[in-house]
Image (spheres, rainbow, N blue to C red):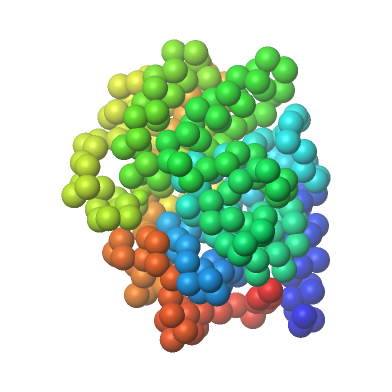
Amino acid sequence: MKNHSIQLSDYLCNSLTITHTMKPNTQQLNDLTIQVRRDILRMVHAVNSGHPGGSLGCTEFMVALYQNIMERKEGFDMDGIGEDLFFLSNGHISPVFYSVLARSGYFPVAELATFRLINSRLQGHPTTHDNLPGVRMASGSLGQGLSVGIGAAQAKKLNGDNHIIYTLHGDGELQEGQNWEAIMYASAKKVDNLIATIDLNGKQIDGSTDEVLAMGSIRAKFEAFDWEVLEIKEGNNIEAIIDGMKEAKSRTGKGKPVCVLLHTEMGNGVDFMMYSHAWHGKAPNDAQLETALSQNYTEGESDY
Ligand SMILES: [Mg+2]
């Protein structure tokens, strides 16, 4: 391991115990974003399998969430009492989830090299039975994360735990009916300690969401279900994400669940992957990986 990567690792290990006065600055967050993109690309390339498009599109969000927005305890336990919790509903973007977890200190970064291998804890879709720290639910079957998040949010209320549940969902995932049962339930039961973010990239595995199954105005639908809704127009900009999520947090505790519509670009950060659904579930070949990595270089890079 190179010297500069040790420094980055030291900083990242410390980040798990970070306090509000110790949060990384925007430059550090952007550097980490580049590192996470490199991880995603190398993980899916190594096994010629996985979902880079949505992972790259949500990289800034996941970095901001874990390194700035969420209040987290040191270490990991499944009960998660006394801290904010995150549930990834669109489990196929596991590469960005695993990278951000590892680089936030939940498990060794070197374990990213086992992505999608037999008997690895890092399966293509996250699971809980191998006790990978940071993973609180199995996901991959789409549409279930909001229901789980609502249950966790209600448990926090019952426990008198004044922390927030964060969830992330694909926009195509909203075509699954279970979501709408959950969306209806959350407002009816005033689950106002929940912030559900929708990755609004307008794309899913087989094409644009409008082509596959048009949903009309997702904002209007959430509002009709009596949710508080706000939009982050620059969903690939760390500062815009942090500002937007702080605003979302300020709207919790007021009787309504909160929905964030996060406008992102699938494949963000790799020019030939952007503006298309083609890289939703396709790995780059050797030459494509080299090009993609050359577009995502940082002086502090610490590839596993
Ligand atoms: Mg999508």
Q: Is residue 105 left or right of residue 213?
A: right
Q: Quadrant of the N terminus?
A: bottom right
- Name the residue rendered at 22%, 42% in the picture: 213
52, above or below 84, in the image = below
Quadrant assignment, res 52: bottom left
Q: Is residue 204 left or right of residue 9?
A: left
Q: Could you tell me residue 7's position as x and y percent?
A: 78, 72
- Name the residue rendered at 67%, 29% in the picture: 163
Q: Could you tell me residue 127's position as x and y percent?
A: 61, 46
Q: Nearer the viewer, residue 133 or 300?
A: 133
- Name the residue rendered at 60%, 19% in the picture: 154
Q: Could you tell me residue 29's position as x and y percent?
A: 61, 61
- Name the residue rendered at 21%, 41% in the picture: 214
Q: How many marks?
A: 0
Q: Is residue 70 left or right of residue 290?
A: right
300, above or below 152, in the image = below
Is residue 67 something that shows in the picture? yes
Quadrant assignment, res 107: bottom right
Residue furthest front in the image: 118
Q: Quadrant of the C terminus?
A: bottom right
Is residue 183 something that shows in the picture? no
145, above or below 154, in the image = below
Quadrant assignment, res 46: bottom right
Q: Could you tell me residue 176's position as x and y percent?
A: 35, 35
